Image (cartoon, rainbow, N blue to C red):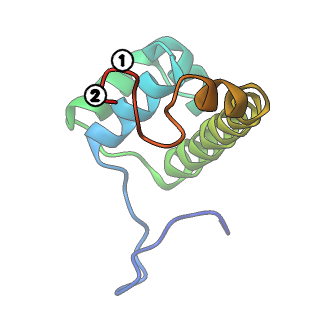
C-alpha cells in the first residue's frame, strides 16, 4: 500500500474523482472493458465509477494508481522522444524561415 495517494492534511486515502477515472481512461485510449481488465473488475463497474454511482475499494484504488503511473510514464517517454526529434531537426528550419528572430518576410 505504499503507492496509495493520501490526503496531506488528514492522511485518508484519496478516492479518484469520477471525472478523473474517465479522463485517464480516455487519455490512455482504453475502452471501459480494457480499463476493467486492468482494474480486475467488470466493465459495468467502470461505468458506475465514471458516473459516480459507486466508489472504488482500496484494492481498486491501488490498481487504478498503478494504471495511472503506467499511462503517465508512457506519456513522458513519448513526449521526451518527440522533444528530441524536434530538437534534432527543428533548429535549422526555424532560422531558415525567419522564426528564430521573430521577424517574417512580410513584416520587413
| Outermost bottom residue | 9
Q: Where's the N terminus, which quadrant?
A: bottom right
> Which quarter of the figure has residue 105?
top left
Q: Residue at x 39, y 26 (%)?
A: 46
Q: Is residue 99 visible?
A: yes
- Give the spatial CA distance, label 2 vs label 1: 6 Å
The answer to which of 27 and 99 lies nearer the viewer is 99
The answer to which of 99 and 55 lies nearer the viewer is 99
Q: Residue at x 44, y 50 (%)?
A: 57
Q: Residue at x 54, y 40 (%)?
A: 100
Tag count:
2
For the residues labelled 2 and 1, say whether their Cβ atoms are less than 8 Å apart.
yes
The answer to which of 23 and 62 lies nearer the viewer is 23
Query: Is disc 2 placed on a helix, strand or loop?
Result: helix
| Res 80 label | none
* Residue for badge 2: 48
Q: Position of residue 10 (x, y in %)?
A: 35, 85
* Residue for badge 1: 44
Amino acid at each position: 500500500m505504499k503507492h496509495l495517494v493520501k490526503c496531506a492534511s488528514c492522511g485518508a486515502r484519496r478516492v479518484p474523482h469520477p471525472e478523473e477515472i474517465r479522463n485517464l481512461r480516455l487519455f490512455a485510449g482504453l475502452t471501459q472493458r480494457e480499463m476493467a481488465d486492468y482494474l480486475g473488475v467488470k466493465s459495468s463497474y467502470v461505468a458506475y465509477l465514471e458516473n459516480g454511482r459507486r466508489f472504488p475499494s482500496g484494492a481498486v484504488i491501488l490498481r487504478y494508481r498503478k494504471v495511472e503511473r503506467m499511462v503517465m510514464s508512457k506519456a513522458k517517454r513519448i513526449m521526451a522522444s518527440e522533444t528530441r526529434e524536434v530538437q534534432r531537426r527543428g533548429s535549422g528550419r526555424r532560422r531558415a524561415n525567419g522564426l528564430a528572430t521573430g521577424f517574417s518576410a512580410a513584416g520587413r
